[in-house]
Image: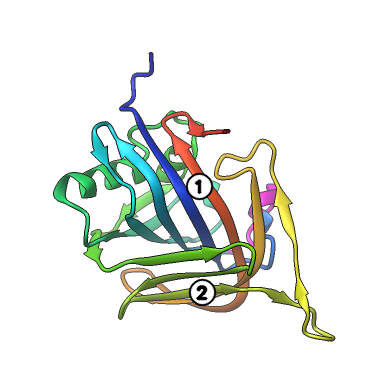
Amino acid sequence: MSEHVDWRLRGAGVDLCNCDYGCPCQFNALPSHGTCEAAVGYHIVEGHFGDVALAGLNVACTFFWPGAVHEGHGQCQAFIDERATAAQRQALLTILSGQEQVPTAFFAIFASTVETMHEPQFVPVEVSTDRAALTATIRVPGVLDGYAEPIRNPVDGSVHRARLLLPDGFEFAETDCASATFNCSGAIRLNYAGRNAMLYDLHMGPNGIIHA
């Protein structure tokens, strides 16, 4: 029997980061430009934390690491859907902190690299993705504005489709690659265009990815 609270998140995930398309981190390589900076969003279609329902809520996080993620010294700020009840807010923050996940799973791994956790914000959060169209948005009005659009062929402007498969991935096993533009005026300042975006299905629990 698991020693962790029974929880599950299933829905749409989108990562926008300052690396080049595809992100070297996915290949155990160093970040494209030295630092790792990102905005991440989740729209929860189905989910619970113990007996606390989480379906329908949106979550966004911004991150900054001065080097590669595994080198640590990271910063994070969470933006939790203002519609969440007190119990839902606590549940989501607990999940994001990795406290109720095995050490080798995604949220726990990332949490272990963060040394500065900025005050979470309980605000309107919008997260939407369309993997077929290669589009996505992460928005916290007045603070965070990010979107993904297709990568374009530089000669004729046609849509360039690329998909990354990670059979042993700990965040996702498959993702569609796109082009990210995002800026944030919160505790972590971000301002990038034409960088890496990844659109994927989120399905996570105490032991990591749930392979349906």
- Mark 2, secondary structure of its residue: strand
Quadrant, the N terminus: top left
- Does the magenta-highlighted stretch encompass residue 30? yes
Asked which quadrant contains residue 187, the reply is bottom left
Please report whichever mark, 1 or 2, sits nearer to the chain's N-terminal start: 2
Picture disc at residue 145: none
Quadrant, the C terminus: top right
- Does the magenta-highlighted stretch encompass residue 145? no
Residue located 62% across and 72% down the image: 195
Residue 24 in the image, given as x and y percentages of width and height: 68, 57
Residue 22 in the image, given as x and y percentages of width and height: 69, 61
On screen, residue 5 versus residue 31, left or right, reads left
Residue located 24% across and 63% down the image: 121
Q: Which stretch appears magenta?
A: 25-34
- Determine which residue is flagged by label 1: 202
- Determine which residue is flagged by label 2: 147
- Residue at mark 1 to residue at mark 2: CA–CA distance: 18 Å
Please identify the dominant SS of the magenta region: loop
Q: Residues within 10 Å of mark 2 (few under 14, many from 20)?
A: many
Residue 53 in the image, given as x and y percentages of width and height: 27, 42
Residue located 55% across and 65% down the image: 17
Outermost residue on the left side: it is 86
On screen, residue 85 versus residue 173, left or right, reads left
Residue located 69% across and 43% down the image: 166
In the picture shown, does residue 208 fall above or below 42? above
